[in-house]
Amino acid sequence: MDKDIQVKLISYRLVRPELFKTLEQSKTHFESYTNDLNSHGHLNAFIDLIEQVLGCLKIMPLQGIDMLASEILHLANHLHEIAAEKRDDCLSTLSYSLIQLEQYLEYFDHKEAEFPTLLLTTINQLRAVGGRQSLPEHYFYRQNSEFVQAIALALETSDEISNESIPADKLTRLRQMYQIGLADYIRETNQGTSLNMMIRSLNRIVDQSIPNGYALIFRFAAAAANAMQKSKINPTRARKQLFAAIDQQFRNLVNNPGQAPKVEHGQNLICGFGYLFLVSGCTDQIVRTLVEQYAIKPLFFNEMEIERERERLCNPSASDDRGFMRALSTELIAVKDNIELAFKTSELQNTVDFPSLTKPLKEICRIFEMAKMTDSVTILQEILVRIEEWDIQKTVLSEEQFSEIADQLTLIENQTLELNSLKSNGSEGEPIQLGVLQEAQQNVIEQTKDGLSLTKRSIDAYLSSGGDSMNLVNLEALMETVRGGTQFLGLKEVTEILKICQDYIRVNLIESKQPLTSEKLETLADVIISVEYYLENMDLKLNSNQKILTLAVDGIKELAA
């Protein structure tokens, strides 16, 4: 165990009895105040007691828990300033925070480790109801000095760039590409492709001649977006705000393309994105490169572990639920074995010991009643009634009767193991003709998207090979197939955009002896990606944003320039 943690544990365990006594007294006064909001004496007593708790916690000090107590105290001191209609929210948040304060102390005592990140949600709830700004997700993550110095140096020297600057119209188009992806990401629709759109925009802008401070921020943002896409971690409000802040950086760059970003703000963004790709658990090449280049300190946890530990913190018994269900399932298997044994005995002795069967069934039935698993209780009660009737009638049971009981117990066992399974939502009564048409349309969308993916791959291969025309052999026919698909779907504007792309590819790639610049090829890929994104929205039955096609048209204009 870490020596620092050991000292904190010893200190905590010495003051624990008095600390919890003070907390109980504070909760009593708080409850009295909530029952009578005019009883200011109780509120003042509550504030005095929380001050004592905070003083005690600061002496140890435990990371995060002293801040939680400080936020409780701050909100309590400012309750009189909060509007009456918001007072109930404040009181509820305070009440929950007091519970979590105790839970975290017990958690620390049990785990013998600190995990202040678990408290951040509650701390931010207290700040929010008090009208204060939330703390960033990476607040408790302290980077090493090498990283901080390297980032600061990179941001401070970011004005050392070439005289060539990115054209304003291209910068605006790449910003619009990012905005379209960001809008869907914030709405939590089409998460995978929205992040792809954002990543594409960020990578493209990094390749341009921009101040290297902006380039560094965008590199970290792209790595974080890539990590989120691969690890499928939750798009929380804080994460949406972090990615939204990149659009502000885009705007600053559009308005002042030669000006460096503000160092302090840039550091906060980079630390936020760095924390995000670390907590995702993603370890692909993009992340590894940044970690090695800037000596980024690793995390000892990831998103999944945060959720698991938060569940244990808020509901210590929750982690035992699965064990409880498994134990219950084991009991059911044992009862089934007893039934099988009883049947074999009855064949030999022509009699059954029914009470030996009903006793364990009644015990399991009571457990299911406490767990409020009503369907299972009903089945068990029916089995018990039947067995009691057989006992009264002194029935000699057949194999079929025993099998019927065993099957019902198996059904309950499956319900126990699959308690959290999702029910499939299927629409009934849909006309078959409509279903066939929709299936055909879906197939066309899929084939069209596949065709666009192959088109992008051919262009990438052409670019990587230094202009080997063999990579373009089937490209024109492929584009023709893709256009046929969009025409079938009635997407006139998309079809026209693809026709222009097809002609451009034929004239400038296939027939021309002059190789295209990599920048022109990248812009062509931007157009194709925009169309692909538009189709992806259709595939997911979302409202395809017209701005996506406008972005494609702007790319075509850039190609023609």
Image (tube, rainbow, N blue to C red):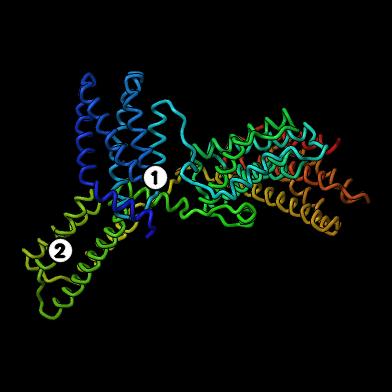
Find residue 254 and report its horizontal and vertical position in percent.
72, 30
Q: Which quadrant, please, contains the N terminus?
A: bottom left
Q: Give the SS element for disc 2.
A: helix
Which quadrant of the view contains residue 25?
top left
Residue 174 visible, this orientation: yes
Q: Which residue is drawn at 81% across and 44% down?
A: 519
Q: Mark 2 points at which residue?
A: 360
Look at label 2 and name its amino acid.
Pro
Q: Which residue is drawn at 36% across and 20% down?
A: 82
Determine whether, in the image, residue 526 is placed left or right of residue 306: right
Most foreground residue, 249 or 56: 56
Determine whether, in the image, residue 329 is placed left or right of residue 145: left
Determine whether, in the image, residue 173 is placed left or right of residue 505: left
Q: Which mark is residue 63?
A: 1
Q: Residue 28 carries which label?
A: none
Q: Is residue 377 above or below residue 402?
A: above
Residue 411 visible, this orientation: no
Find residue 294 and report its horizontal and vertical position in percent.
62, 51
Q: How crowded is mark 2: few (under 14 residues within 10 Å), some or many (20 or more)?
A: some
Most foreground residue, 148 or 394: 148
Q: Residue at x 23, y 48 (%)?
A: 372
Most foreground residue, 330 or 251: 251
Find residue 22 and report its horizontal and vertical position in percent.
22, 38
Q: Is residue 252 above or below residue 433?
A: above
Look at label 1 and name its amino acid.
Gln
Mark 2–mark 1 Cα distance, whole angstroms, equals 49 Å
Question: Which is more N-terminal, label 1 or label 2?
Answer: 1
Find residue 412 and report its horizontal and vertical position in percent.
27, 58
